[in-house]
Image: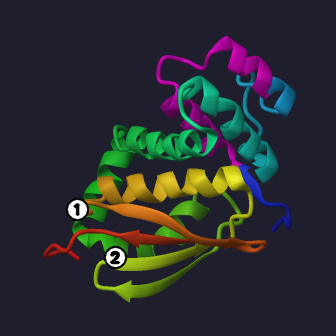
Amino acid sequence: MSDTPLIFHHTIQGFFSRAFPGGVPPGLKAQLRTAGVDLDKPLLPAYPMETWSRCIELSAPFAFPDDMPQEAWRRLGERMIDGYQETMIGRAMFATLKLLGPRRMLQRSRKNFRSGNNYTDVVLSDVSPTEMDLWFNETHEVLRHFVAGIVLAGMRVGGAEAPHVDVLRTDARGVTYRASWAASPKA
């Protein structure tokens, strides 16, 4: 396996179809080409993590022009998951995750993220019956906020009541999120 952190093409394709359901704006397409992703040609099998981060960074002002960058990056993560749940595969996956409840759903984080890349590592720690800490080996600021949005939206569509995700700390190796939700019979 490659030591280079890579994002698989289906992640890139899914992101742009969900972030821009009406089509990717031409101005963004031009910027993406200079960043190494040409959406008018077949996608490569995988892209470097840095390219992926740049795609999200460039997309944010087009999707959420009135938001601060960090908020726009998080909202893009949410939008990706919210859009995914509208697909046939997404509906089936999230129906299953709802049955698992928030804790067991979060315990599948590494497996779920690894379906879209070759590098994500996740370490989980129980905090309370309705809280978990999740450490991700995510070092890019853009991706740290994007992942927070993915986790939040994943919890929401997975059935967590009143989900919340906060960044607890960051360092050179990764980021730790605190994921919490309201108590329910599934917690």
Kindly identify the residue that appears in the image at 71 percent across and 24 percent down.
Answer: 39
Q: Is residue 39 above or below residue 128?
A: above
21 magenta-colored: yes
Q: Position of residue 173 (x, y in %)?
A: 75, 74
Query: Dividing the picture into quarters, in which one does residue 159 lie?
Result: bottom left
Q: Position of residue 45 (x, y in %)?
A: 74, 44
Q: Is residue 80 above or below residue 162?
A: above
Kind of residue indicated by mark 2:
Arg
* Residue 103 tag number: 2
Q: In which quarter of the image is the N terminus?
A: bottom right
Kindly identify the residue that appears in the image at 49 percent across and 42 percent down.
Answer: 75
Answer whether residue 40 is visible to the viewer in this image. no
Q: Where is residue 133 in the image (x, y as percent from the top left)?
A: 48, 78
Q: In this view, does 22 lie above or below 73?
A: above
Magenta segment: 8-32
Q: Is mark 2 on a helix, strand or loop?
A: helix
Q: Quadrant of the C terminus?
A: bottom left
Answer whether residue 118 is visible to the viewer in this image. yes
Kind of residue indicated by mark 1:
Glu
Kindly identify the residue that appears in the image at 83 percent across and 32 percent down.
Answer: 35
Q: Position of residue 63 (x, y in %)?
A: 55, 27
Q: In screen coordinates, is 106 left or right of 156?
A: right
Give the image's coloring scheme: rainbow
Predominant secondary structure in magenta?
A: helix
- Numbered-mark total: 2
Q: Residues within 10 Å of mark 1 (few under 14, many from 20)?
A: some
Q: In screen coordinates, is 36 left or right of 171?
A: right
* Residue 161 tag number: 1
- Mark 2 and mark 1: Cα distance apart in space: 12 Å
Q: Do the residues labelled 2 and 1 touch (CB within 8 Å)?
A: no
